[in-house]
Image (cartoon, rainbow, N blue to C red):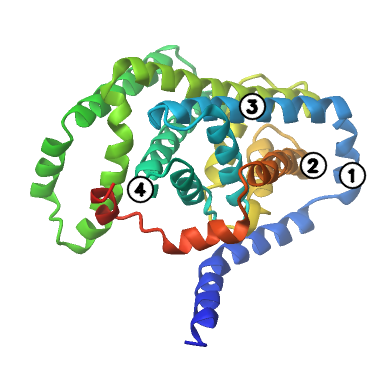
Amino acid sequence: MSDQPDTKKSGIWKQMLPGILISVVIILILVFVVDFGDLIASFRNVSVRLIMIVFALQSVAFIFRALAWRVTLEGIPTWAQCFWTVTEGYLLNLLPLRLGEIGRAVIMGGVIHRSPFFVFSTVLLERLFDVIITLIMLLATIPLVSGADFSPNLYYVLISIFLIGLVLLFLIAKNQENFVKRLGKIIKSESKFGRFLYPKLQSLLNGLSVLAQPKKFIIWLFWILMTWVCWIATMLVCMHAFFPNLPVWSSLFVQSITALGGAIPSAPAGLGVIEGAFVAALRIFGINQSEALGFGMFNHSMGIITPVIWGLIGFAVQGQSFSQVFSGLRKVNLSEEDAKND
């Protein structure tokens, strides 16, 4: 029994080690390629006004994300409970193992006395649309970055793909049982991949229930898009402050690259990896590594400071502690069995 805590700690370190190594390698590369004089000089672009604008935009984004989440949670929690839990989740994502999504499910499940599985499915739906929006921004800007002849038809194609995807998701949400049965003919539930896939698929399908209610879905999608408006506005403001000569669309490309870069395993808070993604994206526009790193460090710092401030306030307001949340994370089982008990 006495060895169990040590075993758990060892397991956590094994999960964290690959990400830490990736971060260390990227940080070492950045150290060798940047000029520290230029790096320090790049912060002349930072002003109190810029910090306040970025903090305000990121805070408003949390408000919109909370409004969207309340729709998929069927209006059970108050807006304030959604807001504080969203900020707590983003704070937890800065910690080892990036447990923000599961943490949100555990915290909100306790607040509204519902299964964490039910809550987690709504978070998965948010993340699905975040990925879709990120990919749309990337695909829309790649032709501009490459200098290829750009046709407005690309926008029509992307919009068509997005709308077709929504229709398919709507049909799946309306016919979940038939969809799972048909999929079961292709992927057996007792297979190794099936055992991995189906609990997660069921979680996502539960979150998709909002799609079967067009009025609710439109409201939810509006708040999700407003969240992205704030995030895009944040990048636009920062890009204009650091690199006023770059085209407006460049901020969409940089944002999509850094969002995808954030998915790479890394040390807590994405240290090194996020900055490396900024440097790589801005290098395409001829920005030297030192200035790009300064820009990335400022953006990343604000992306840490905002959720830390609001998240800590949220833990205090809702009377929770990190120990309670981590205890809940150890006990939670986001499996199909949990869903049946919901």
x, y percent for residue 217: 36, 21
Left or right of residue 225, residue 91 in this image = right
What number is the disc on residue 294?
A: 2
Identify the mark nearer the N-term, 3 or 1: 1
Identify the mark nearer the N-term, 1 or 2: 1
> Disc 3 marks which amino acid?
Ser
Vertical relation: 42 (above or below) 4: above
At x 61%, y 39%, the residue is 87
Identify the mark nearer the N-term, 2 or 3: 3
Marks 3 and 1, Cα distance to the nearest angstrom?
22 Å
> Disc 2 marks which amino acid?
Gly
> Disc 4 marks which amino acid?
Phe
Q: Is residue 203 visible?
A: yes
What number is the disc on residue 117?
A: 4
> Disc 1 marks which amino acid?
Ile
Q: Secondary structure at mark 1?
A: helix
Marks 4 and 3, Cα distance to the nearest angstrom?
36 Å
Kindly identify which residue carries mark 1: 40
Q: Is residue 136 visible?
A: no
Identify the mark nearer the N-term, 4 or 2: 4
Dots 3, 1 in contact, CB < 8 A = no
Identify the mark nearer the N-term, 4 or 3: 4
Kindly identify which residue carries mark 3: 251
